[in-house]
Image (spheres, rainbow, N blue to C red):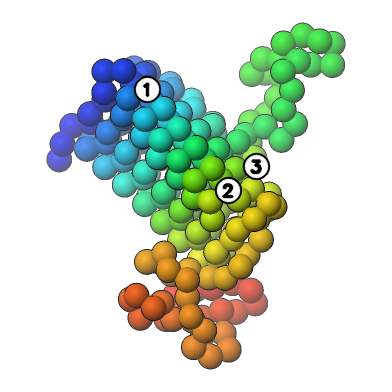
């Protein structure tokens, strides 16, 4: 497999680990102790925080910001200018007016499960989990955990349907039964959750 490729204008800390075939494009920054799997793409101007864990075949589009201690599983897509935040109570200074340091707060990372996609300019608040193969529409603000295969949109984001692994909106076949129009895969809905058959 190919060695990682880092563009000359990118800033990749020597303590970061890049898997085979991973590409880091112009002006992107990958901080210390971040670990990226194989076949990843880090777009122009994207940011990967210290200790962030990223699986295989993950795409971070241009100017996506992934703050520590986020974890992205295999096959995740993070759209342009999306932000995965980490501080529920952000302040520049403490109550005494002194500049806050890393020891003054507890970072709470976002987890994005296998195959999930976040559209352009999505914002995810700290500590949220985006389920497997879920789809978050462009511009959404995610304030709650997202179930597997859920299609969510809006501010704050709300579920508006289901998607399959191909990313297309599922069609209702019968009560509690859904079908992907592209692949024909069937899914069962039970108690507000969806699973592939």
Q: How many numbered badges does the structure rendering display? A: 3
In the image as oriented, which residue stretches furthest toward the left?
1
Dot 3 falls on a residue whose secondary structure is: loop
Residue 38: x and y, percent?
27, 41
Q: Earlier in the sequence, mark 3 or mark 1?
A: 1
User: Dots 2 and 1: beta carbons under 8 Å?
Assistant: no
- Out of 21 and 173, give the one closest to the viewer: 173
Q: Earlier in the sequence, mark 2 or mark 1?
A: 1
| Screen quadrant of the C terminus | bottom left
Residue 54 appears left or right of 96: left
The tag on residue 27 is: 1
Residue at x 64%, y 55% (from the top left corner): 154
Residue 160: x and y, percent?
61, 68
Residue 35: x and y, percent?
38, 33
Q: Nearer the viewer, mark 2 or mark 1?
A: 2
Residue 146 appears left or right of 117: right
Q: Is residue 197 above or below residue 169?
A: below
Residue at x 49%, y 27% (from the top left corner): 49
| Screen quadrant of the N terminus | top left
Q: Earlier in the sequence, mark 2 or mark 3?
A: 3
The part of the image, by quadrant, that contains residue 137 is bottom right
The part of the image, by quadrant, that contains residue 20 is top left
Dot 1 falls on a residue whose secondary structure is: loop
The tag on residue 2 is: none
Q: Alpha-carbon distance for marks 2 and 3? A: 13 Å
Dot 2 falls on a residue whose secondary structure is: loop
Q: Nearer the viewer, mark 3 or mark 1?
A: 1
Residue carrying label 3: 125
Q: Is residue 12 above or below residue 145?
A: above
The tag on residue 139 is: 2
Q: Alpha-carbon distance for marks 2 and 1? A: 24 Å
């Amino acid at each position: 497999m190919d060695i990682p490729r880092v563009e000359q204008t990118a800033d990749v800390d020597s303590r970061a680990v890049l898997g085979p075939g991973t590409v880091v494009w112009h002006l992107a920054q990958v901080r210390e102790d971040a670990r990226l799997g194989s076949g990843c793409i880090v777009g122009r101007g994207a940011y990967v925080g210290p200790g962030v864990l990223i699986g295989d075949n993950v795409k971070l589009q241009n100017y996506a910001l992934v703050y520590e201690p986020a974890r992205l599983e295999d096959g995740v897509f993070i759209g342009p200018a999306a932000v995965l935040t980490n501080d529920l109570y952000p302040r520049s200074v403490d109550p005494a007016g002194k500049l806050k340091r890393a020891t003054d707060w507890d970072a709470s990372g976002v987890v994005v499960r296998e195959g999930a996609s976040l559209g352009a300019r999505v914002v995810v608040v700290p500590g949220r989990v985006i389920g497997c193969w879920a789809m978050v529409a462009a511009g959404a603000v995610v304030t709650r955990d997202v179930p597997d295969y859920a299609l969510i949109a809006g501010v704050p984001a709300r579920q508006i349907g289901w998607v399959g692994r191909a990313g297309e909106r599922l069609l209702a076949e019968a009560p509690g039964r859904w079908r992907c129009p592209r692949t024909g895969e069937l899914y069962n809905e039970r108690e507000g959750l969806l699973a592939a058959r």
